[in-house]
Image: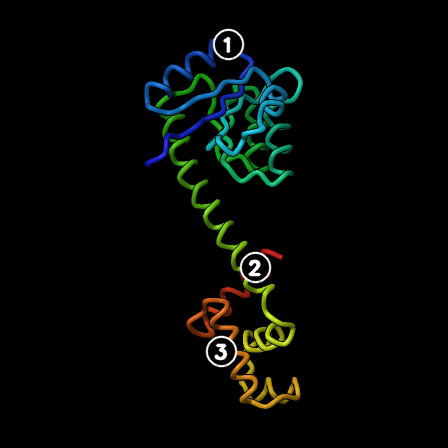
Amino acid sequence: MADVIHVALVDDDAAVRDSLQLFLTRRHLKVTCFETAEQFLKARDGYESFHCIVTDVRMPGMSGLDLVNYLIDRGWIRPIIVITGHGDVDMAVSAVKAGAFDFIEKPFDETRLLASIRDAVEKGRQRISDAVEQEKMLARFEALSARQREVMGLAVAGLSSKEIGTKLKISPKTVENHRAWVMLRMGARNVAELVRIAMQLERRV
């Protein structure tokens, strides 16, 4: 990956923080350490600079699970990896169900953690790219007129131009003009692509 991976490491154990920071830095990652989840949240004005969060589960105050839930509830889409002691596996599983990318048990193989971070960041970047594309798609849809949206909906439902014209009480030629404009604005080369776009929009709105 061209960009240096910037990791936020959240763990109340100073020995773990120091060890992981040294290991990851030597592997050309940038690491910023936080002793508690609250410290991370207070300092995250520039949180977009973090490509990944690695957090312990059991910490004083807000737990790693609480942190995962807090961030996911607020639309965080960058990956979170949870590190956990054996007795906290149930909490780690809950964190993954809530939206964390992975959990790794202590004592863990640092190479395994590094591989997970790199995999998580690669997938996270793809999710961000997909989210940006979906926002653009939604903006294009919202720029359509009410009539164009009607034509798009009926075309996606499988109606012909003649059937759409009858339903909307407009001429087939007018329908064709609307369809052509919809296809152009939505970037669809054919009806099948328009159907896929409509399905993505349904999941988005």
Residue ID at (52%, 73%): 182
* Type of amino acid under label 1: Ala
In the rendered view, would you say 93 is above or below 177? Answer: above
Q: Nearer the viewer, residue 123 or 125?
A: 125
Task: Using a 10 Å C-alpha cutoff, classify the residue at mark 3 as few (fewer than 14 neighbours), some (14 to 19) or many (20 or more).
Answer: some
Residue 19 location, x and y as percent?
Answer: 41, 12
Give the distance between the C-alpha atoms of the residues marked 2 and 1, in whole angstroms: 46 Å
* Type of amino acid under label 3: Ala
Residue 164 location, x and y as percent?
Answer: 59, 84
| Count of residue discs | 3
The residue labelled by disc 2 is: 138
Task: Using a 10 Å C-alpha cutoff, classify the residue at mark 1 as few (fewer than 14 neighbours), some (14 to 19) or many (20 or more).
Answer: few
Q: Quadrant of residue 35?
A: top right
Foreground: disc 1 or disc 3: 3
* Type of amino acid under label 2: Leu
In the rendered view, would you say 194 is above or below 117? Answer: below
Q: Are marks 1 and 3 in contact (CB under 8 Å)?
A: no
Horizontal relation, residue 30 to residue 161: left or right:
left
In the rendered view, would you say 203 is above or below 160? Answer: above
Give the distance between the C-alpha atoms of the residues marked 3 and 2, in whole angstroms: 18 Å
Identify the disc placed on residue 86: none
Identify the disc placed on residue 180: 3
The residue labelled by disc 1 is: 14
- Secondary structure category for the residue under label 1: helix
Q: Quadrant of the N terminus?
A: top left
Colour style of the rendered protein structure = rainbow
Q: Quadrant of residue 27?
A: top left
